[in-house]
Image: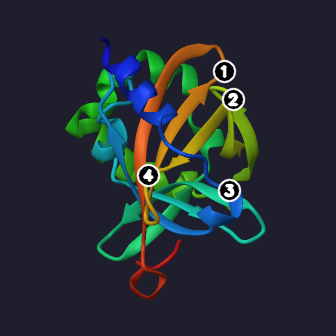
Amino acid sequence: MSKQRTALEAFRSLPPIKPRELVGLWAGHGIPSGHPFDGVLKNLGWFGKRFMPDLRADALLFRSGERRLMAINPAWIPLGLTLHFYRLGRMPIARNLFSAIKRRLCAAGPVASIKTMEFGGVESAAMIYDDQPIVDHFRRIDQQRVMGAMTIRGDERIYFFELERVDERSKPGNR
């Protein structure tokens, strides 16, 4: 069985989650499944996601120094090129280049919306990117963790990830 199929079955076995249950700061990590983005976000210093009470979201939070987080605007990311040249995204040179330019990619505010959507026959929370053909679907693992399935319109592969709730009192600084 392929890693993609195994990860999809694990995702589908989990119960749904409501959009409001996602509100807060979440630390993330990828789940290896054979997707081109496996290892890329980690290499670039991805922290996770932040979901606001108004159901808007910082879709891509990256570490910026020891204790700061920076929200990146995904509209600036050339998705087609990124999918095609994904191997570069795992290299140290990509991390160094991203570090040098990420301040120019900073989001002016939330860049995605959260709502309930159907995926695999189940309605659950999903995050829809404003300016990219991307939807992140979520399912509950437990009270502190969710599994995500990132879909890109026109690409049958799914990027899987896990988010763990961060205690708001000890969260790193913002932007």
Checking the image for residue 102, the label placed there is none
Q: Earlier in the sequence, mark 2 or mark 4?
A: 2
Give the spatial CA distance, label 2 vs label 4: 26 Å
The kind of residue on which mark 2 rests is Pro
The kind of residue on which mark 3 rests is Lys
On the image, which quarter does residue 132 sit in?
top right
Secondary structure beneath label 4? loop
- Would you say residue 109 is visible in this rendering? no
- Would you say residue 15 is visible in this rendering? yes
Q: Say left or right for 58 vs 30.
A: right
Quickly name the residue at label 2. 133
Secondary structure beneath label 1? loop
Q: Are marks 2 and 3 in contact (CB under 8 Å)?
A: no
Q: Nearer the viewer, mark 3 or mark 1?
A: 3
Q: Is residue 72 above or below residue 86?
A: below
Q: Whole-percent x and y of residue 48?
A: 45, 57
Give the spatial CA distance, label 2 vs label 3: 22 Å
Q: Are marks 3 and 1 in contact (CB under 8 Å)?
A: no
Secondary structure beneath label 2? loop
Q: Are marks 1 and 2 in contact (CB under 8 Å)?
A: yes
Quickly name the residue at label 1. 153
